[in-house]
């Protein structure tokens, strides 16, 4: 039954709990009654935290009783030693359940699921991540005019971000898996925010200082994705994994939209340094909320409601940080290599489209620079919508009994074959509008990958998800660097059709590798 267990009965001023209970501690001192507080029970082999409510006893004037939300037979322990309460027998028969009477008394903001607060904060971090990343692509125009930078120098500045970004992919995963994702993601956000604010200062001092600051920014953003993956692997149940990751990654897409939309306005009104000062300062606001509300694991959150803890721990996955990384075991698994290869194949085409799209619009479709800039927002919006749609579809399929392996293969196949199909159509369309539509559809189907390979790290190795994402994303970043450079070489000796053929070929390779070797089952514990 869902009744509470009576723990203690007392007069209006409760006695010192240490005089009544052995191995008990109150998280709050003498709260005003009626009230609610936490009681920590420390038996020999485990620890339980109960939410306690104090209610006035209807049978006696001025008397109060403590009740816990354990679903068990009530044991009246007034005037008895606390050891008479059969905690172990009660706990063994039930798991902490929802107590409607207590929940109804909580304000709505306290009933909001804590795991989705964590997801929302991660979404906000990735929103800031891409806002701070894309602002340079807009600000570089007035900056290069002010400092007389040639195209080669501009390319060097743009690429310096990846020096640090590559450096911390695997390191960030190791750090997150061993010390917890809260510290690592918080470090990443505050680090890249400071680097963003320092960008105008470094540019005025000299080019070498600017290159170092941009590389430092890459260091901060490089740890973000592995840290986020580590946190969500501990906080989010399997049935909600796809949509939670899709929401977080859509923050990146919306961050690009926000950065591209607001940067020109800020530059026009207040000058190009204002972009870096305003965007970078937002990181401090996020960091303050993160420190106050976030925890690396549900085990560390004293305010997590029992029913939500039950839902999270239904996965029976260890929430503790790992002590060492079994590199040999990880690299010996075929699904791990399927992730690495597929991530490379996926990011080759994605990075090319996102970095070269304005050039394609301008040179091939004959849009002016303003039109090209506005149309570049469309694929990001499409990806944000499609990522969340794909996450909802994937979680719905899993909840209806389809295997995680089947769902991951379906979603990633869409993420590979969709872009491949729409890129092949670009050589057959005869109007700019249809070409833009093909580009948007290509990126829209690409976003289904968030429910495919991007969710798979937590499926196959939840305890090492940070390291695993660091490994595969290193391959993905290398694909972006090499693919972007190779596109310039191909265009010097060939055409845009040749560029798209290479991307389509890699999408097909990724499809085959993924469907042959990937799995949605846990292979590393």
Image (tube, rainbow, N blue to C red):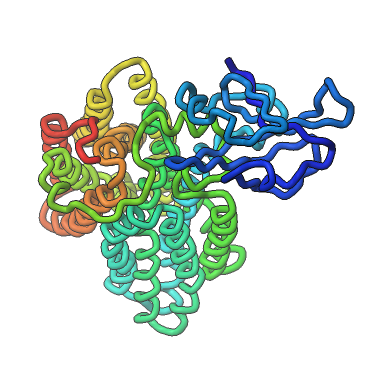
Tell whether 525 sits left or right of 433: left
In the depicted structure, whether residue 403 falls above or below residue 203:
above
Q: Locate the N terminus and report the quarter of the image it occupies.
A: top right
Tell whether 507 sits left or right of 150: left
* Residue placed furthest toward the bottom: 205
**Residue located at (18% from left, 46% from top):** 340
**Residue located at (21% from left, 40% from top):** 524
Work out whether residue 118 or residue 497 is closer to the camera in this orientation and state it. 118
Tell whether 388 sits left or right of 346: right
Work out whether residue 276 or residue 272 is closer to the camera in this orientation and state it. 276
The picture quadrant where one finds residue 66 is top right
* Residue placed furthest toward the front: 80
In the depicted structure, whether residue 93 falls above or below residue 519:
above
**Residue located at (47% from left, 67% from top):** 196
* Spot occupied by residue 370 in the image (x, y as percentages of width and height): 45, 52
Is any part of residue 441 visible from this angle? Answer: no
Q: How many marks?
A: 0
Work out whether residue 249 or residue 104 is closer to the camera in this orientation and state it. 104
* Spot occupied by residue 349 in the image (x, y as percentages of width and height): 23, 45
* Spot occupied by residue 401 in the image (x, y as percentages of width and height): 32, 16
* Spot occupied by residue 363 in the image (x, y as percentages of width and height): 29, 51
Is any part of residue 454 visible from this angle? Answer: yes
In the depicted structure, whether residue 481 falls above or below residue 87:
below
Q: Locate the C terminus and report the quarter of the image it occupies.
A: top left
Work out whether residue 488 or residue 340 is closer to the camera in this orientation and state it. 340
**Residue located at (35% from left, 64% from top):** 218
């Amino acid at each position: 039954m869902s009744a509470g267990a009576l723990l203690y009965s007392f007069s209006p001023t409760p006695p010192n709990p240490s005089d009544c209970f052995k191995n008990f501690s109150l998280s709050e001192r003498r709260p005003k009654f009626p009230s609610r507080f936490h009681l920590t029970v420390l038996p020999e082999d485990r620890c339980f935290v109960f939410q306690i409510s104090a209610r006035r006893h209807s049978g006696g004037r001025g008397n109060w009783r403590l009740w816990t939300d354990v679903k068990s037979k009530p044991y009246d322990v007034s005037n008895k030693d606390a050891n008479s309460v059969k905690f172990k027998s009660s706990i063994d028969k039930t798991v902490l359940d929802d107590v409607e009477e207590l929940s109804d008394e909580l304000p709505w903001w306290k009933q909001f699921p804590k795991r989705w607060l964590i997801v929302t904060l991660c979404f906000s971090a990735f929103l800031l991540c891409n806002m701070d990343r894309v602002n340079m692509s807009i600000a570089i125009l007035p900056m290069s005019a002010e400092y007389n930078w040639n195209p080669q120098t501009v390319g060097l500045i743009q690429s310096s971000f990846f020096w640090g970004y590559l450096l911390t992919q695997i390191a960030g995963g190791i750090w997150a898996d061993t010390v917890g994702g809260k510290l690592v993601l918080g470090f990443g956000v505050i680090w890249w925010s400071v680097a963003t604010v320092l960008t105008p200062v470094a540019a005025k001092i000299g080019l070498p200082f600017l290159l170092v600051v941009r590389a430092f920014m890459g260091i901060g953003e490089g740890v973000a994705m592995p840290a986020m993956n580590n946190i969500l692997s501990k906080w989010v149940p399997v049935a909600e994994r796809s949509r939670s990751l899709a929401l977080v990654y859509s923050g990146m897409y919306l961050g690009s939209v926000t950065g591209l939309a607001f940067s020109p306005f800020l530059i026009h009104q207040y000058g190009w340094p204002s972009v870096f000062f305003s965007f970078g300062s937002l990181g401090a606001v996020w960091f303050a909320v993160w420190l106050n509300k976030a925890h690396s694991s549900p085990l560390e959150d004293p305010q997590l409601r029992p029913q939500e803890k039950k839902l999270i721990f239904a996965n029976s996955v260890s929430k503790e940080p790992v002590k060492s990384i079994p590199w040999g075991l990880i690299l010996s698994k075929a699904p791990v290599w399927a992730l690495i290869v597929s991530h490379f194949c996926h990011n080759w085409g994605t990075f090319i489209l996102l970095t070269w799209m304005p050039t394609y619009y301008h040179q091939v479709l004959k849009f002016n620079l303003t039109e090209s800039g506005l149309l570049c927002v469309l694929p990001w919006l499409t990806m944000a919508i499609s990522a969340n749609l794909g996450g909802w579809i994937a979680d719905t399929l899993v909840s209806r009994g389809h295997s995680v392996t089947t769902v991951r293969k379906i979603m990633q196949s869409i993420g590979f074959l969709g872009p491949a199909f729409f890129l092949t159509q670009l050589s057959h369309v005869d109007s700019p509008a249809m070409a833009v539509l093909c580009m948007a559809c290509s990126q829209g189907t690409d976003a289904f990958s968030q429910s495919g390979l991007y969710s798979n790290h937590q499926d196959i190795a939840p305890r090492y998800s940070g390291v695993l994402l660091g490994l595969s994303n290193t391959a993905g970043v290398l694909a972006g660097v090499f693919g972007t450079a190779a596109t310039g070489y191909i265009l010097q000796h060939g055409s845009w059709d040749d560029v798209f053929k290479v991307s389509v070929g890699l999408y097909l390779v990724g499809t085959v590798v993924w469907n042959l070797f990937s799995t949605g089952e846990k292979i590393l514990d």
